[in-house]
Image (cartoon, rainbow, N blue to C red):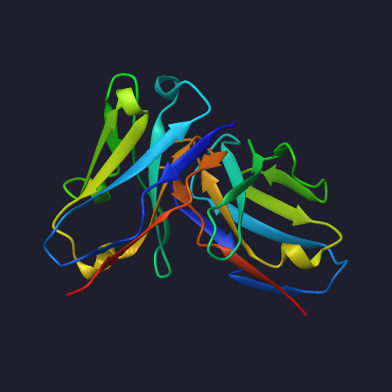
């Protein structure tokens, strides 16, 4: 069965970076894009962008350009998202998703000094 | 970006009732709309895709419809487990955008 297993919660200091992962199983990894979504209590759900897992090509929501960097490791069927220059406004749950149907369990990223 | 205006923000209903949640798109999204249910601490679960198609395994009391740029999610015969949060999402144009959510509570 299709599964997207995300890495664990992160506590980071302002100005630092974090890299979270999304390991896919149960299907051919390179056949589907992986999207990333941010969820906060205040802003709701926001679409960050997606990566073509076959070519590595990316799309970023303008709002997240310079903040998020999407990569993949085809050998391990894993997608990554690096968040840089963290501020308290980056505190959120981050999800990876394959289409609309399959979502990871989410990663809580907390930015605090 | 396409704006998705979801209403109401919260809704209180009794067991067995029928409730409707709506999303208004700021432009034509050609039925490229999904509805999700989200339980506390869990990731969103797909209920409806392409505006009116029921995802496998979702109870038939959930249904979706559209009228122009207005999209609706109807829940018939409300059950206790339905008292959670619902979101719409357009996937017609990037960036994909979501409604602000509707929190459904039981009276």
**Residue A36 in view, yes or no:** yes
Instruction: Give the residue drawn at x 36%, y 55%.
Output: A8
Residue A11 point in image, percent of width and height: 26, 65
Relative to residue B47, is residue A76 drawn left or right? left
Residue in front for this viewpoint, A55 or A12:
A12
Is B10 drawn above or below residue A30 in the view shown? below
Q: Give the total of numbered labels.
A: 0
Residue in front for this viewpoint, B29 or B49:
B49
Instruction: Give the residue drawn at x 74%, y 45%.
Output: B58
Instruction: Give the residue drawn at x 70%, y 52%.
Output: B73
Residue in front for this viewpoint, A113 or B20:
A113
Q: Which quarter of the image is occupied by the C terminus of chain B?
A: bottom right
Relative to residue B11, is residue A55 drawn left or right? left
Is A51 drawn above or below residue B73 in the view shown? above
Residue B56 point in image, percent of width and height: 73, 36
Residue in front for this viewpoint, A108 or A64:
A108
Residue B44 point in image, percent of width and height: 55, 52
Q: Quadrant of residue B76?
A: bottom right
Relative to residue B99, is residue B2 drawn left or right? left
Residue B92 point in image, percent of width and height: 49, 35
**Residue A52 in view, yes or no:** no
Instruction: Give the residue drawn at x 43%, y 53%.
Output: A106
Relative to residue A79, is residue A87 drawn left or right? left
């Amino acid at each position: 069965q299709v599964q997207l297993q995300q890495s664990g919660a992160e506590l980071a200091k302002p100005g630092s970076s974090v890299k979270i992962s999304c390991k896919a199983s149960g299907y051919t990894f390179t056949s589907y894009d992986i999207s990333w979504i941010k969820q906060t209590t205040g802003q709701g759900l926001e679409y960050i962008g997606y990566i073509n897992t076959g070519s590595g090509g990316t799309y970023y929501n303008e709002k997240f350009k310079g903040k998020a960097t999407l990569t993949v490791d085809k050998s391990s069927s894993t997608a990554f998202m690096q968040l840089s220059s963290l501020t308290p406004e980056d505190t959120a749950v981050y999800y990876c998703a394959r289409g609309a149907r399959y979502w990871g369990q989410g990663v809580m990223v907390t930015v605090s000094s | 970006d396409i704006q998705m205006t979801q209403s109401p923000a919260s809704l209180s209903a009794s067991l067995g009732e029928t409730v409707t949640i709506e999303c208004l798109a700021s432009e034509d999204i050609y039925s490229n709309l999904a509805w999700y249910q989200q339980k506390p601490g869990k990731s969103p679960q797909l209920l409806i895709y392409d505006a009116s198609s029921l995802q496998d395994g979702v109870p038939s009391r959930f249904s979706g419809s559209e009228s122009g740029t207005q999209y609706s999610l109807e829940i018939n015969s409300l059950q206790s487990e339905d008292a959670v949060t619902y979101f719409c999402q357009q996937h017609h144009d990037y960036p994909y955008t979501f409604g602000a959510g509707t929190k459904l509570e039981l009276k």
